[in-house]
Amino acid sequence: MPKRKDIKKILIIGSGPIVIGQACEFDYSGAQACKVLRKEGYKVILVNSNPATIMTDPELADKTYIEPITPEMVAKIIEKERPDSLLPTLGGQTGLNTAVALAESGVLKKYKVKLLGADLKAIKRAEERDRFKKIIQDIGLDVPQSGYAHSLDEAIKVAEEIGFPVIIRPSYTLGGMGGNVAYNIEEYRRMAQWGLDLSPRHQILVEESVVGWKEFELEVMRDRKDNVVIVCSIENLDPMGIHTGDSITVAPAQTLTDKEYQIMRDASLKIIRAIGVETGGSNIQFAVSPKNGKLYVIEMNPRVSRSSALASKATGFPIAKIASLLAVGYTLDEIPNDITKKTPACFEPTIDYVVVKWPRFTFEKFPATSPELTVQMKSVGEAMSIGRTFKESFQKAIRSMEIDRYSLDAKHIKPGLNDEQINERLRKNYWDKLWYVAEAYRRKFTTERIYELTHIDPWFLNHIRDIVEMEANLFAGGLEELMPELLRQAKQWGFSDKYLAMKFGVEETEIRKKRFDAGIRAVYKMVDTCGAEFEAATPYLYSTFETECEANPTKRRKIMILGGGPNRIGQGIEFDYCCVHAAFALKEIGVESIMVNCNPETVSTDYDTSDRLYFEPLTFEDVMSIVETEKPDGVIVQFGGQTPLKLSKSLYKAGVPIIGTSPESIQKAEDRKLFNQLVDKLGLLQPAGATAMTYEQTLKVAGNLGYPVLVRPSFVLGGRAMHIVYDESALKACVREALEVSGEHPILIDKFLDDATELDVDAICDGKTVVIGGVMEHIEEAGVHSGDSACFLPPVSLKPEIIAEVKRQTKMLAMELQVRGLINIQFAVKDDKIYIIEVNPRASRTIPFVSKAIGVPLAKLAAKVQAGMTLEELGFTEEVSRNYYSVKEAVFPFMKFSGADVILGPEMLSTGEVMGISDDYGIAYAKSQIAAGCSLPTKGTVFISVRDADKARGIQVAKKLLELGFKILATRGTCIELIKNNIPSEFVRKVVEGRPNVVDLMINNEVDLIINTTIGEQTIKDSFPIRRTALDRQIPYFTTIRGGLAVARAIEALQKEKLTVKAIQSYYRK
Amino acid sequence: MPQNKAILLLEDGTVFEGRSFGAEGVAVGEVVFNTSMAGYQEITTDPSYYEQILTMTYPMIGNYGTNALDWESRKVFCSGFIVKENCPMPSNWRSEKSFSDYLRENKVVGLEGIDTRKLVRHIRNEGAMRGIISSSELNIGVLKKKLGAYPGLVGRDIVKQVTLGQSYKWDKGVVDVLADKELKPAKKYKVIAMDYGIKQNILRLLVSHGCKVEVMGAEATAKQILAKKPDGIFLSNGPGDPAAVTYAINTIRDLLGKLPIFGICLGHQLLGLALGGKTYKLKFGHRGANHPVKNLDTGAVEITSQNHGFCVDIDSLAGKNVELTHINLNDNTLEGLRCKKLKAFAVQYHPEASPGPHDSHYLFNQFTAWMDKVKKRKSKPLLY
């Protein structure tokens, strides 16, 4: 069937900020949709609050709204744009929920907007678990026993019927949020109540536990003519009970016979038809009993999902793109397979390699939270690897994680554990369980025993056993004794040079040499959707140790871009955005782009983003092999965050042509001593500081500097193990960790500028000209990690002469460092003095935000500069100033980590960001808050409790809020201070002061807004329940006084005017 | 267990070196590849792979072992088997024996540890070719000589070697492995299934569609067949060049128009030849479980299981009163034909799957529907 002519203008809802459970996979899917729908001649209207996305680039949609994704705001966009249809299935759960809300509230009907892909009925059939369960049973399939509860009493009744253990799943939450396994009634009560609170519908599903069963997923596509294909099957290494997003998964399914697989396939076809997803992709999860193959249907996503992104990357079948084409009426047989060009998309990909996806965790940032994996997702990113065998792919996946682990090394086992303790570790679902599995094999545990403890299928266990045995063979003697044949086998099994070098105690180059002498080199195979049955036209490659290489490099001028690897806190989509822009830029100037990355969620690993894609880990060995094969004219390390930067030195040493800012300059900015010399030479200021290698040295340095001091390890991103300490006892508590994280490098100790204003500046330089991209004023004071701080562009509170001076210093530093491309500088301003905090001669996290704010694609320009063009040639020699305000706000994962505190500090904790734009900065800030999921009250009661240093400004905030009609509650000290200043406020007890206290009032819905700043370990501990309750009950809270000031202004603005929406294309028009 | 060296020599002189698994020895055959990711046990027991050395594009084979239920015939028919990595420690609740033990017991030579993707690309580019696989004799000269003596498949009738050659009754239906239940409705039709190398899942599906099935050897004559008074005749899959199986073509020609005929794979080719068409050899054939086939009656696409090296020439059927019913979307070759007047239809692919998707099971209903129609006519002779 040809495409539909009855639709012309399509609204696409994005997924908003990156959060756990909803990451850049929806930028990938949304960007694909925008591109293909516009190519088909449709007008595309897009809404997404996340500026770090490719999809919100102004050229991707006809109208792009960087506005909060709430039903109210989207309704305004609909009213303004009058789209005739809405594609709800590409923006994750956020997009789907928003579409459902718009349909249910009658907005879609009112403006005659059709839902494409899945209609309201189908969405509800899939999403509402009781309906879903009934449909599944009606078509003759099984689901785990379960029941719904809308209250705790109801919940207890259901659990009694099913029997423990049970799984609790709150309805309509993201990433399985609030999901839990309860083994007894006591924990059940707590978990059930939490789940009820979290569910927007106050509904939980209580389900028979199939913990320990095998878990599978199928990716299904359906078209208007009812053709259905399975794109990919995925088998989880981790058994049921661990969220799929947190599980190590493998494609294709490994342990199913064809008969069992076909039963699952038949079930999937029946399900997608019965649910009535008319066109597009769906993801169906199954649990399989390891004893008798019994099959339970667990759930279905009637939309493109994280697994769809994985399946797309794993097979080369672009699910989101095809889903978009199907949504506008094409059928599968009418769409060509992009990879082969000659065969149609109506087929089922077959793969001739093994894909392993490995989740990336950041438990180290949330020490109060148990690192145990459950049915609620906790991972912040993932890497995917491709190898010819499971072992190869598995070991590639480990090193793709960048967690300084290269195999299942025994050194990661906690020393001194006895066998019983190993048992215990195997029983617990900690993220690093597989290292303990390996250890168990070293201790001669049998596969049966390990299976009983872990419920990991013996198929996977046996492979781990093989790896452990191989290790014993490999390292039985010295490197000289290692036979080439064994070395070859080790490479085929995915052992990295780095790991072999570490174990043999030699340099990695020695292993390389030995390998090359024996003729053992990586070759590249294609991901071609068809197991080599047809010729592939798209160079999408992975490495393996076989005989034939299919890389077939071209003779064109070519530049390689190193990506950022798995998302983690501190390094996420922003860097992928920059890499993608680099690829686009190279295409524009006719240079071949070669992308290297291993993150399946990203746009950078889409095969049509760059000319050639290498889906590979970002390690020295893996990158060098590609360089040797491709022989690029240049390699860009500036865009992928810390990952490629860390490699740059060794690559440079190996003769790789790194382009852009020279590694010497990078060194100058990163090395403490060289940097001090630089700052001195230019006559600039920086906080006093020194380095230390030992515990004692650190204490001495800090004493000399005078407290407070800022302590941080060298070479980390995201403020890992970074602390501000106000006295020696606090310092003692954090030195060891900092030293450990810093490794062989010294830790840095700086005088901390208390209550300074922090600025972030992004600029671009070609060696002759420097152009400021933007100066951002942080809302939170210096000391809060810049990635966690909200910021204004342009600044709102600084004197023009200060801003001018900051720009002057930026230009000076960029020229001095001879930057080619981007530079980011952080300044602190205190008492009108400007201090340099940090210089990063690379793309920063704020590049996408600044680019969106000023309407100039900075990363693209930078890539062209690196390829040799001047800013003059590019026509970008003047700073762009805009007459509206842009606010960036960070989004945090605290909700997912029970027990975590929400106080902001120098260690970055946010996973994503949103942007608010308006002519009024109060409104811009308000929009950023709404977009971040915090709906500001315009009336009600505010609770204020501030530390002594904040009292003066606390009074300002209180006064403002009082004027705005808020009733004020305050703790003793704050209350006295307020009353002294003629601000009527009511005293309320702290939690430690007895009851009723502030938490009681919060639970009784008597508090609408919280401003709580603290200092000192004890105070922080005492006030923790306030912040946690605020978080759990979704009461807006602010933990810095500057945040409090900003929110007061925002509330004022909200009281004065209604929120309006405006496309970024209109903002840029001036 | 230490593994012996094993090699594959192709007729163009290309050599692949790996390790042996399964049985030790030497085997010759046509080297072909299959792109199914699962179903190796069904594939190795499919008689259509007779005299073929099979390589799987999926690199890890043997993962779920082998079992008593997943056999498609009385023995393993392929002459050699090549994988990137065999799994010696399978895991599946139905597994009874590892794949290597299974091959060893069934005397099939296995080769593992070669760059199978390189081999597949070679076949794709150069076409399916003769090859010899060996773990016992490693001298290339000797192997070359042996390979030179192998005549290949074109022009040879090898159906006689795989057909059981005698008639027997078949009474097993499809088993639901999860429910451990056999699907066996009341028998409404008597069907003769011609065994040119038949896969058992065809027989099971016939039983599960209400057929009383009797299997007859490939050389059974029309007279012998009609003497059984069947309601319909099924023409099975099988190995080799269809044009060489002249006796079967003659028999089919004799049967045409007398009662409903349904053919699969080789059965499709033989029917095409009996209807006056021609067959030819494909460059490297279709073997896999993901081939899109368009049903020209409905426009719907079926994902099909395939295994054939020969094909009916579409042009050769022009003016023969034959309808084209199915077409392969990858290369537009013929996948199904029908002659309404003569009550015969056939498909080139494998609707019985095993392994593969079940999208095409409806063809068995079509067969029974045709038998119903004819029966109705017979029961109401006055209308004629």
Image (cartoon, coloured by chain):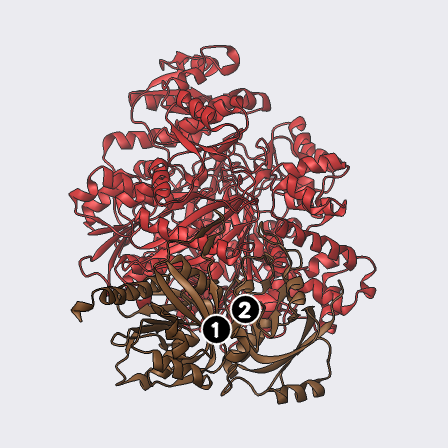
Query: Does residue A54 appear in this view?
Result: no
**Left or right of A701: which side holds B330?**
left
Neighbourhood count class around disc 1 (C-alpha, 10 Å): few under 14, some 14–19, many 20 upward = many
Query: Does residue A933 appear in this view?
Result: yes
Q: Disc 2 on helix, strand or loop? A: loop
The amino acid on which the numbered mark 2 sits, given as a three-letter code, is Thr
Give the x, y percent position of residue A430: 61, 39
Q: Which one is in front, A573 or B238?
A: B238
Give the x, y percent position of residue A859: 44, 58
Tag 1–tag 2 contact (CB < 8 Å): yes
Residue under numbered circle 1: A533
Residue under numbered circle 2: B57
Q: Disc 1 on helix, strand or loop? A: loop
Point 36% across, 23% down: residue: A1008
Q: Distance from label 1 to label 2 (Cα)?
A: 9 Å
Q: Which one is in front, B119 or A747?
A: B119
Which of the chains bears the disc numbered 2? B
**Left or right of A900: which side holds B140?**
right
Point 20% across, 57% down: residue: A7
Image colour assigned to chain B: brown
